[in-house]
Amino acid sequence: TTWSYQTSADPWTAGAMSDVFVVPNLNVMYREVYVVDWVNETCAVEQTADGELPVTTTINLEDVENQPALAFYSRYHMQYVKLPELERSVGNINNIMNDCDCTNNAEKECMLKGGENKGCDELGEQ
């Protein structure tokens, strides 16, 4: 496969914000799955308040449907879309760690939305 890229001669679209970054990445399949936890005391499956099975989103990095890919992002897109997304993600993880009091107990288990448990040490590695 051969491709080429050149910047615009138009002075309104040329310049640093039109620089393009070629980013190798992995297209990962996210899947919604049901969480099935057996409660021995009641001999029943744990359910949400409305009687449904809890749902969480998970990934499998070894899934055969994952494919290598390339992303082409302009500097503008990186600065105003991707970096804010990453900053929000870091903020969300920090909020979870604060709510779970991870600063005082790094080995504590935190209950995430969707019923998933993660250790403070796992959250800190994300």
Image (tube, rainbow, N blue to C red):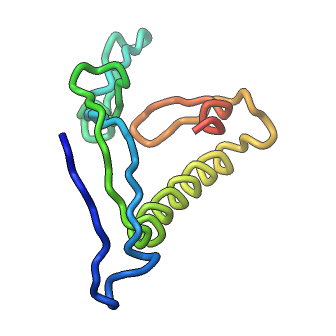
Side (left or right) of 60 relative to 125 = left
Residue drawn at (50%, 56%) of the image: 86
Residue at the bottom extreme of this rendering: 12
Pick whichever, 35 or 72, lies toward us. 72
Q: Is residue 44 above or below residue 55?
A: above
Q: Report how many numbered discs are placed on residues in the image.
A: 0
Which quadrant holds residue 43?
top left
Give residue 113's position: percent from left, percent from top: 44, 42
Outermost residue, left side: 1
Q: Quadrant of the N terminus?
A: top left
Q: Quadrant of residue 29?
A: top left
Residue 125 vs residue 11, the one in the foreground: 11
Q: Residue at x 26, y 41 (%)?
A: 50
Residue 55 seen: no
Q: Residue furthest right?
A: 104
Q: Nearer the viewer, residue 2 or 92?
A: 2
Q: Quadrant of the C terminus?
A: top right
Determine which quarter of the picture holds residue 91. bottom right
On the picture, is 79 further left or further right than 67? right
29 or 15, which lies in front? 15
Q: Is residue 41 above or below residue 115?
A: above
Q: In the displayed structure, would residue 16 be above or below residue 53?
A: below
Q: Is residue 80 above or below residue 40?
A: below
The residue at 64%/49% (across/down) is: 99
In x, y percent, where is residue 15? 42, 80
**Image coords of residue 20 (percent x, y):** 38, 63
Judge whether residue 98 can be spotted in this image: yes
Image spot of residue 27 (x, y percent): 29, 37
Q: Who's the residue at 49% across and 39% down the image?
A: 112
